[in-house]
Amino acid sequence: MFIIDDDSQVRAAIRAVLEDAGMLVEDHADAKAFLDAYRPGGEGCVLVDARLPGMDGLELLDRFRAAGHRLPTIMITGHGDVRMVVQAMKAGAVDFIEKPVSRDDLLASIGRALERARDSSKRLAWHDSAANSIAGLTERQREVMDRVLAGHPSKNIAADLGISQRTVENHRAAVMRKTGAASLPALARLALAAAAGAQP
């Protein structure tokens, strides 16, 4: 497991959880140190803070993928927003978790990331399930969802679509209910998985 975070206390806390779960851990204070030290090969997972000094987490993801590395990557942040989640997923992150993260949530996220990396049929099943969830939305709900995931506030969405803000909120609630997404980051993961599943 590779941890990249400029906060030494966060690195130490995550390292303790992962080592307690029997994992081998390497940690770095910045993206450059990680890239300089990284040697491909074997199974693993990268946990990277979104906001790092110098090269940030998104740039690291872009460089890591451009170099052909395929380790699953989880983006961690204390200041997440929907736009950042979408950018992280498009850059190749398999999950996005917000600080403070509980031990169970962290281990569950790593477990999902490793499982998806290992098993392409499970990845396809996840795409299919996500696509089915999105397919259950009405056209208007999809329009609202797309604008929410682009980071637009309800007031702007209402003006764009010529509907009331209350109607936008009702559509947002319906989208969350129909997709089973518990949060906006979860909805972003679902929408991106559905889109990836639709590509050849």
Image: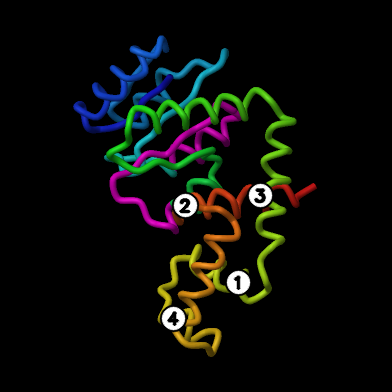
What's the amino acid at mark 2? Ala
Quarter of the image with the N terminus is top left
What's the amino acid at mark 3? Ala
Residue closest to the far bottom: 162
Query: Could you classify mark 4 by the number of other residues whose Cα lies within 10 Å: few (under 14), some (14-19), or many (20 or more)?
Result: some
Q: Which residue is mark 2?
A: 182
Vertical position of residue 127 compared to residue 68: above or below: below
Q: Which residues are magenta?
A: 59-84
Nearer the N terminus, badge 3 or badge 1? 3
What residue sits 73% from the left and 38% below the top?
124
What's the amino acid at mark 1? Gln
What residue sits 28% from the left and 17% below the top?
16
Which SS class for mark 4? Answer: helix
On residue 156, the disc is: 4
Left or right: 59, with 16 as reference point:
right
Residue at mark 3 to residue at mark 4: CA–CA distance: 27 Å
- The answer to whether residue 30 is magenta is no
The residue lying toward the viewer, choosing from 23 and 91, is 23
